[in-house]
Amino acid sequence: MRKGTLVVVSGFSGAGKGTVLAQVLTKRPDLYLSVSFTTRAPREKEQDGVNYHFITREEFQARINRGEFLEYAEYVGNYYGTSMQVIREKLEQGIDVILEIEIQGAAKVREKLPEAVSLFLVPPSFEELSRRLHDRGTDTEATIQKRLETARREVKEIVNYDYIVVNDTIDRAVEEVLAILTAEGCRKERRLHLIEGV
Ligand code: 5GP
């Protein structure tokens, strides 16, 4: 059976990754969106096991020690990580998997699995990013400032991604992500087995 494609999606905090990916999933329910582990406190409306697996730092450290993460990173004072086992199972079953992770984690995934496809989602401008983070109303001013500083540093890493998606309007960003997924599915590596005599 064909293995699934691993798709890594990164973007500045507030670039709209969550909103865009939620809509992509309604159009492509066959995709699996990985649920990460984090030591961050749940935001209002976030559910354990749905948005994240919320765990303590001790539990996170124990999972690191047991080698359970495909990747993990510290971001604005909290740990975030992707379970190796779940991802491996899905890919083996031929299911395409989306990881919504930050830049350091994405770099580790590319190192371990060079066949992964990576997308970086950007807002139309930094002013717009700041406005979106404030409008979201979920973080303190200090956290927002940290997230904006992090974003300015992260700009240099974008060159390491395969695709850049500009989230100007959500519909257009969703369309672009879907187009990338479709094109990746048409790669010769995924199609040659369909043709006799190649
Ligand atoms: P937030 O706290 O806003 O939910 O997430 C903060 C950042 O952590 C986002 O850029 C998000 O993509 C990233 N993130 C979420 N899960 C993971 C993960 O499992 N690994 C890594 N490296 N980053 C993650």
Image (cartoon, helix red, strand yellow):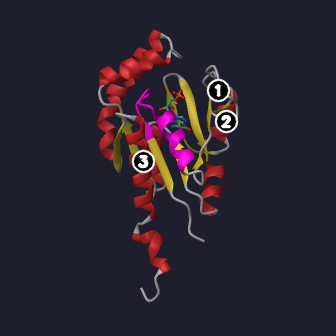
Along the line of sight, the residue nearer the viewer: 144 or 37: 144
First in sequence: mark 1 vs mark 3: 1
Along the line of sight, the residue nearer the viewer: 118 or 20: 20
Residue 184 placement (x, y as % from top left): 42, 60
In reply to whether residue 26 is colored magenta, the answer given is: yes
Residue 6 visible within the image: yes
Q: For mark 3, give the secondary structure.
A: helix
Q: Is disc 2 in contact with disc 3, using a CB cutoff of under 8 Å? A: no
Q: What residue occupies the far bottom of the structure in this picture?
A: 197
Image quarter of the N terminus: bottom right
> What mark, if any, has residue 185 been given in the picture?
none
Q: Amino acid at mark 2?
A: Val
* Residue bearing mark 1: 46
Along the line of sight, the residue nearer the viewer: 132 or 93: 132
Residue at (39% x, 38% y) in the render: 121
Q: Position of 20 compared to 127: left or right?
A: right
Check the image and report above or below for 147 versus 7: above
Residue 41 placement (x, y as % from top left): 63, 21
* Residue bearing mark 2: 50
- Label 1 lies in ligand 1 vicinity (Cβ under 8 Å): no
Numbered range of the magenta stretch: 10-27
Along the line of sight, the residue nearer the viewer: 145 or 109: 145
Residue 178 placement (x, y as % from top left): 44, 51
